[in-house]
Image (cartoon, coloured by chain):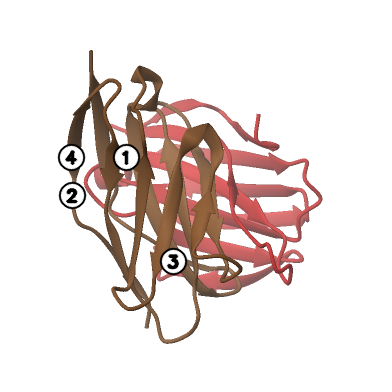
Chain colours: A brown, B red
Amino acid sequence: AQSVTQLDSHVSVSEGTPVLLRCNYSSSYSPSLFWYVQHPNKGLQLLLKYTSAATLVKGINGFEAEFKKSETSFHLTKPSAHMSDAAEYFCVVSDRSYKYIFGTGTRLKVLA
Amino acid sequence: ETGVTQTPRHLVMGMTNKKSLKCEQHLGHNAMYWYKQSAKKPLELMFVYSLEERVENNSVPSRFSPECPNSSHLFLHLHTLQPEDSALYLCASSQLGQSNEKLFFGSGTQLSVL
């Protein structure tokens, strides 16, 4: 069975400082891992996807995530937060077609 | 614009009403999904259709009835809902069998049941 845990329900950072959103996963197979972002009153938008080609995955808007098999982690980072990054972020694991398991989300607040 | 369009954006209905949510994808995908997003709960998969056949029904009450007339359209028919069914309903699509498979979401329908 697969599962995903987002370790923080809320994260606050100051504008211009680094962002770290933490995600741990569990899967019986070699999973695909995703990060999605949801802005208020919007659907979910894909930030990036890991599929075993490279452990460091670069996504849109300056975000990247590193796959660490030994730690079963897939944390999302960004060197410098922008006000427009304020949103909810979801870590997702999938180990087979059409089976996607979503984390409970991390709400990112960016302070001016 | 993600290529997945949902209507209406907002819906208020009484418990005795019948309404339908509509989803259309313009991406040529072969699978479509309904998810329910409630406050403080993970996204819940409701239904998956692959090539217009239902391949997943995640123990959803019968007051929710999906319909997939073709690979581009997906409906969710609602009747005799309960207040706890108030939530954001998200439609998504994907291309099954592709190594780069991923979900593309619509903007959702915010449903309030009075």
The residue positioned 48% from the left and 46% from the top of the image is B78
State if disc 1 and disc 3 touch (CB < 8 Å): no
3D distance between C-alphas at marks 3 and 4: 20 Å
Looking at the picture, do discs 2 and 1 lie on one chain? no
Q: Which disc number belongs to residue A93?
A: 3
Is there a contact, CB below 8 Å, between mark 4 and mark 2?
yes
Viewer-nearest of labels 4 and 1?
4
**According to the image, label 1 marks what residue?**
B86
Q: Secondary structure at mark 4?
A: strand
Whether tag 2 and tag 3 are in contact, CB under 8 A, the answer is: no
Specify the quadrant that holds the N terminus of chain A: bottom left
Chain bearing tag 3 is A
Q: CA distance from mark 4 to mark 2?
A: 5 Å
Q: Describe the element under mark 2 as helix, strand or loop.
A: loop
Q: Do marks 3 and 1 both belong to one polypeptide chain?
A: no
Give the chain letter at badge 1.
B
For the image, the number of numbered tags is 4
Q: Which residue is mark 2?
A: A8
**At 51% across and 43% down in the image, what residue appears?**
A47
Q: Quadrant of the C terminus of chain A?
A: top left
Viewer-proximal residue among A38 and B6: A38
Closer-to-camera residue (A100/B73): A100
Q: Could you tell me if the residues under marks 3 and 4 are in contact, i.e. CB atoms within 8 Å?
A: no
Q: Secondary structure at mark 3?
A: strand
Image-based side of A16 in relation to B70, left or right:
left
Residue B71: x %, y % from top left: 78, 55
Amino acid at dot 2:
Asp
